[in-house]
Image (cartoon, rainbow, N blue to C red):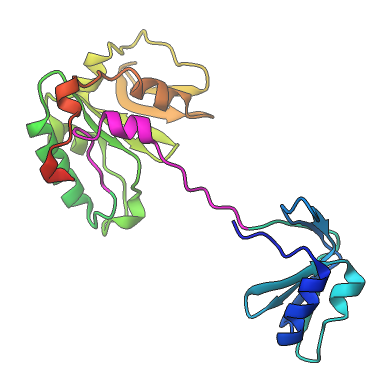
Amino acid sequence: MLLFAAVMGMMLSVQAQQNPTLIIHNADIITLDDAQPQAQAIAIANDRIIAVGNNADILRLKTTNTKVISANGRTIIPGLYDSHLHVIRAGRFYNTELRWDGVKSLKRALQMLKEQAERTPKGQWVRVVGGWNEYQFEEKRLPTLEEINAATGNTPAFILYLYAHAYLNKAGIEALHIDEQTPNPAGGLIQKNAEGQPTGLLVAEPNAYILYSTLAKLPELTPAEKVIPPSAL
Protein backbone atom coordinates (compact mmCIF):
# COMPACT_ATOMS: atom_id res chain seq x y z
CA MET A 1 0.00 0.00 0.00
CA LEU A 2 1.31 3.38 -0.99
CA LEU A 3 1.95 5.57 2.05
CA PHE A 4 1.43 9.31 1.99
CA ALA A 5 4.49 11.54 1.96
CA ALA A 6 5.14 12.81 5.44
CA VAL A 7 8.00 15.29 5.52
CA MET A 8 7.00 18.83 4.52
CA GLY A 9 10.43 19.65 3.17
CA MET A 10 10.14 16.77 0.76
CA MET A 11 6.61 17.87 -0.10
CA LEU A 12 7.66 21.34 -1.03
CA SER A 13 10.56 19.97 -3.07
CA VAL A 14 8.17 17.78 -5.05
CA GLN A 15 5.73 20.66 -5.43
CA ALA A 16 8.45 22.84 -6.89
CA GLN A 17 8.49 20.45 -9.84
CA GLN A 18 4.73 19.81 -9.95
CA ASN A 19 1.68 21.95 -9.26
CA PRO A 20 -1.34 20.23 -7.72
CA THR A 21 -4.34 19.66 -9.94
CA LEU A 22 -6.48 18.84 -6.88
CA ILE A 23 -6.41 19.81 -3.22
CA ILE A 24 -8.74 18.31 -0.63
CA HIS A 25 -8.73 20.17 2.69
CA ASN A 26 -10.74 20.27 5.94
CA ALA A 27 -10.37 16.49 6.12
CA ASP A 28 -9.39 13.91 8.71
CA ILE A 29 -6.70 12.09 6.70
CA ILE A 30 -5.39 8.73 7.99
CA THR A 31 -1.93 8.45 6.45
CA LEU A 32 -0.73 5.10 7.92
CA ASP A 33 2.62 6.83 8.42
CA ASP A 34 3.86 6.59 12.02
CA ALA A 35 5.80 9.85 11.62
CA GLN A 36 2.64 11.76 10.68
CA PRO A 37 -0.41 9.57 11.31
CA GLN A 38 -2.97 12.25 10.53
CA ALA A 39 -3.29 15.32 8.35
CA GLN A 40 -5.87 17.90 7.34
CA ALA A 41 -5.24 18.30 3.62
CA ILE A 42 -3.85 16.50 0.61
CA ALA A 43 -2.43 17.75 -2.69
CA ILE A 44 -2.68 15.61 -5.84
CA ALA A 45 -1.11 16.15 -9.25
CA ASN A 46 -2.57 14.08 -12.08
CA ASP A 47 -3.70 11.19 -9.84
CA ARG A 48 -0.46 11.13 -7.81
CA ILE A 49 -0.24 12.30 -4.19
CA ILE A 50 2.44 14.95 -3.89
CA ALA A 51 1.85 16.36 -0.41
CA VAL A 52 -0.12 16.01 2.81
CA GLY A 53 -0.14 18.35 5.76
CA ASN A 54 -2.20 20.99 7.52
CA ASN A 55 -4.74 23.14 5.71
CA ALA A 56 -2.60 26.25 5.56
CA ASP A 57 0.52 24.57 4.18
CA ILE A 58 -1.32 22.57 1.51
CA LEU A 59 -3.59 25.42 0.38
CA ARG A 60 -0.46 27.52 -0.11
CA LEU A 61 0.42 25.18 -2.99
CA LYS A 62 -2.67 25.85 -5.09
CA THR A 63 -2.50 27.61 -8.44
CA THR A 64 -5.19 29.04 -10.69
CA ASN A 65 -5.57 25.59 -12.26
CA THR A 66 -6.00 23.71 -8.97
CA LYS A 67 -9.42 22.32 -8.10
CA VAL A 68 -10.07 22.76 -4.37
CA ILE A 69 -12.54 20.60 -2.47
CA SER A 70 -13.52 20.82 1.19
CA ALA A 71 -14.09 17.44 2.80
CA ASN A 72 -16.13 19.11 5.57
CA GLY A 73 -14.45 17.00 8.23
CA ARG A 74 -14.90 13.65 6.51
CA THR A 75 -12.28 10.89 6.85
CA ILE A 76 -9.94 10.01 3.97
CA ILE A 77 -7.97 6.75 4.01
CA PRO A 78 -5.62 5.02 1.54
CA GLY A 79 -7.25 2.58 -0.87
CA LEU A 80 -7.98 -0.86 0.55
CA TYR A 81 -7.38 -4.02 -1.46
CA ASP A 82 -9.08 -7.23 -0.30
CA SER A 83 -6.79 -9.69 -2.01
CA HIS A 84 -7.31 -12.78 0.12
CA LEU A 85 -7.06 -16.45 -0.80
CA HIS A 86 -8.80 -19.59 0.43
CA VAL A 87 -5.55 -21.52 0.27
CA ILE A 88 -6.41 -24.40 2.62
CA ARG A 89 -9.89 -25.23 1.31
CA ALA A 90 -8.96 -24.63 -2.32
CA GLY A 91 -5.81 -26.71 -1.95
CA ARG A 92 -7.60 -29.61 -0.26
CA PHE A 93 -10.27 -29.89 -2.94
CA TYR A 94 -8.52 -28.53 -6.02
CA ASN A 95 -8.82 -31.79 -7.95
CA THR A 96 -12.58 -32.12 -7.45
CA GLU A 97 -13.76 -28.52 -7.42
CA LEU A 98 -15.52 -27.15 -10.51
CA ARG A 99 -15.02 -23.46 -11.31
CA TRP A 100 -17.54 -21.39 -13.27
CA ASP A 101 -15.36 -18.26 -13.34
CA GLY A 102 -15.72 -16.57 -16.72
CA VAL A 103 -18.19 -19.13 -18.15
CA LYS A 104 -20.36 -17.12 -20.51
CA SER A 105 -23.57 -19.14 -20.59
CA LEU A 106 -25.64 -21.07 -18.09
CA LYS A 107 -26.08 -23.77 -20.71
CA ARG A 108 -22.32 -24.32 -20.76
CA ALA A 109 -22.11 -24.16 -16.95
CA LEU A 110 -24.71 -26.91 -16.64
CA GLN A 111 -22.87 -29.00 -19.24
CA MET A 112 -19.68 -28.60 -17.21
CA LEU A 113 -21.63 -29.65 -14.12
CA LYS A 114 -22.79 -32.82 -15.91
CA GLU A 115 -19.23 -33.60 -17.05
CA GLN A 116 -17.90 -33.05 -13.52
CA ALA A 117 -20.56 -35.34 -12.02
CA GLU A 118 -19.65 -38.09 -14.47
CA ARG A 119 -15.96 -38.02 -13.52
CA THR A 120 -16.38 -37.50 -9.78
CA PRO A 121 -15.23 -40.61 -7.84
CA LYS A 122 -17.93 -42.55 -6.01
CA GLY A 123 -18.32 -41.22 -2.50
CA GLN A 124 -17.14 -37.73 -3.46
CA TRP A 125 -19.10 -34.59 -4.26
CA VAL A 126 -19.32 -32.10 -7.07
CA ARG A 127 -18.34 -28.74 -5.59
CA VAL A 128 -18.83 -25.31 -7.17
CA VAL A 129 -17.65 -22.92 -4.46
CA GLY A 130 -18.30 -19.35 -5.55
CA GLY A 131 -16.55 -17.26 -8.18
CA TRP A 132 -19.62 -16.82 -10.40
CA ASN A 133 -22.92 -14.95 -10.66
CA GLU A 134 -25.91 -14.90 -12.98
CA TYR A 135 -24.86 -11.68 -14.73
CA GLN A 136 -21.90 -13.39 -16.41
CA PHE A 137 -24.30 -15.76 -18.19
CA GLU A 138 -25.94 -14.68 -21.43
CA GLU A 139 -29.22 -16.04 -20.00
CA LYS A 140 -28.89 -13.57 -17.08
CA ARG A 141 -30.39 -15.98 -14.57
CA LEU A 142 -29.46 -18.52 -11.91
CA PRO A 143 -29.71 -22.28 -12.42
CA THR A 144 -32.81 -24.00 -11.08
CA LEU A 145 -32.74 -26.96 -8.75
CA GLU A 146 -34.39 -29.01 -11.49
CA GLU A 147 -31.54 -28.19 -13.88
CA ILE A 148 -28.92 -28.98 -11.25
CA ASN A 149 -30.55 -32.34 -10.45
CA ALA A 150 -30.79 -33.22 -14.13
CA ALA A 151 -27.09 -32.43 -14.64
CA THR A 152 -25.72 -34.21 -11.58
CA GLY A 153 -27.97 -37.27 -11.20
CA ASN A 154 -26.90 -39.55 -8.37
CA THR A 155 -23.64 -37.70 -7.64
CA PRO A 156 -24.00 -35.42 -4.59
CA ALA A 157 -23.51 -31.74 -5.47
CA PHE A 158 -23.02 -28.51 -3.54
CA ILE A 159 -23.12 -25.21 -5.45
CA LEU A 160 -22.41 -21.98 -3.58
CA TYR A 161 -23.82 -18.68 -4.85
CA LEU A 162 -21.92 -15.73 -3.37
CA TYR A 163 -22.65 -15.49 0.38
CA ALA A 164 -26.41 -15.63 -0.26
CA HIS A 165 -27.42 -19.25 -0.75
CA ALA A 166 -26.31 -22.69 -1.85
CA TYR A 167 -27.89 -25.52 -3.82
CA LEU A 168 -27.88 -29.18 -2.79
CA ASN A 169 -29.08 -31.71 -5.33
CA LYS A 170 -31.30 -34.63 -4.28
CA ALA A 171 -28.30 -36.92 -3.81
CA GLY A 172 -26.67 -34.28 -1.60
CA ILE A 173 -29.79 -33.93 0.55
CA GLU A 174 -29.82 -37.70 1.08
CA ALA A 175 -26.08 -37.88 1.78
CA LEU A 176 -26.38 -35.25 4.52
CA HIS A 177 -29.56 -36.86 5.91
CA ILE A 178 -31.57 -33.65 5.63
CA ASP A 179 -35.33 -34.28 5.83
CA GLU A 180 -38.58 -32.68 6.98
CA GLN A 181 -37.46 -33.05 10.60
CA THR A 182 -34.14 -31.22 10.14
CA PRO A 183 -34.30 -27.89 11.99
CA ASN A 184 -32.96 -24.64 10.57
CA PRO A 185 -29.54 -23.83 12.04
CA ALA A 186 -29.07 -20.49 13.77
CA GLY A 187 -28.83 -17.76 11.15
CA GLY A 188 -29.86 -19.99 8.25
CA LEU A 189 -32.84 -21.43 6.40
CA ILE A 190 -33.38 -24.87 4.87
CA GLN A 191 -36.07 -24.21 2.27
CA LYS A 192 -38.92 -26.74 2.34
CA ASN A 193 -41.80 -27.27 -0.07
CA ALA A 194 -45.53 -27.37 0.71
CA GLU A 195 -45.19 -30.99 1.87
CA GLY A 196 -42.41 -30.01 4.27
CA GLN A 197 -39.66 -31.70 2.28
CA PRO A 198 -36.29 -29.93 1.75
CA THR A 199 -35.94 -28.54 -1.76
CA GLY A 200 -32.16 -28.32 -1.72
CA LEU A 201 -31.94 -24.54 -1.30
CA LEU A 202 -29.91 -23.35 1.71
CA VAL A 203 -30.38 -19.66 2.45
CA ALA A 204 -28.04 -17.41 4.44
CA GLU A 205 -30.60 -15.75 6.65
CA PRO A 206 -29.05 -13.52 7.87
CA ASN A 207 -25.50 -14.94 7.80
CA ALA A 208 -23.52 -17.50 5.83
CA TYR A 209 -23.03 -20.02 8.65
CA ILE A 210 -25.40 -22.56 7.08
CA LEU A 211 -23.47 -22.41 3.80
CA TYR A 212 -19.97 -22.98 5.17
CA SER A 213 -21.01 -25.38 7.92
CA THR A 214 -22.65 -27.53 5.23
CA LEU A 215 -19.57 -27.31 3.03
CA ALA A 216 -17.48 -28.46 6.00
CA LYS A 217 -19.55 -31.67 6.23
CA LEU A 218 -18.55 -32.80 2.76
CA PRO A 219 -16.08 -35.73 2.66
CA GLU A 220 -12.33 -35.22 2.69
CA LEU A 221 -10.23 -36.34 -0.27
CA THR A 222 -7.71 -39.10 0.18
CA PRO A 223 -4.02 -38.10 0.07
CA ALA A 224 -3.75 -39.61 -3.42
CA GLU A 225 -6.78 -37.63 -4.64
CA LYS A 226 -5.22 -34.39 -3.38
CA VAL A 227 -2.07 -34.78 -5.47
CA ILE A 228 -2.04 -32.41 -8.43
CA PRO A 229 -0.77 -34.13 -11.59
CA PRO A 230 2.26 -32.46 -13.20
CA SER A 231 0.21 -31.85 -16.35
CA ALA A 232 -2.06 -29.51 -14.38
CA LEU A 233 0.78 -27.32 -13.15
Residue displayed at 64% across by 74% down: 48
Where does residue 54 sit, x and y in percent of width and height?
Answer: 88, 66
Pick the front one: 81 or 134: 81
Depicted 82 relative to depicted 60: above or below: above
Pick the front one: 25 or 110: 25
Q: In the rendered view, does 90 fall on the left or right side of 30?
A: left
Residue displayed at 82% across by 69% down: 8
Q: Quadrant of the N terminus?
A: bottom right
- Corner quadrant of residue 155: top left
Q: Is residue 106 visible?
A: yes
Depicted 93 relative to depicted 196: above or below: below
Pick the front one: 160 or 15: 15
Q: Which residues are the magenta region?
A: 79-100
Q: In the rendered view, does 119 fall on the left or right side of 3?
A: left
Depicted 159 relative to depicted 29: above or below: above
Where does residue 52 sit, x and y in percent of width and height?
Answer: 78, 67
Q: Quadrant of the C terminus?
A: top left
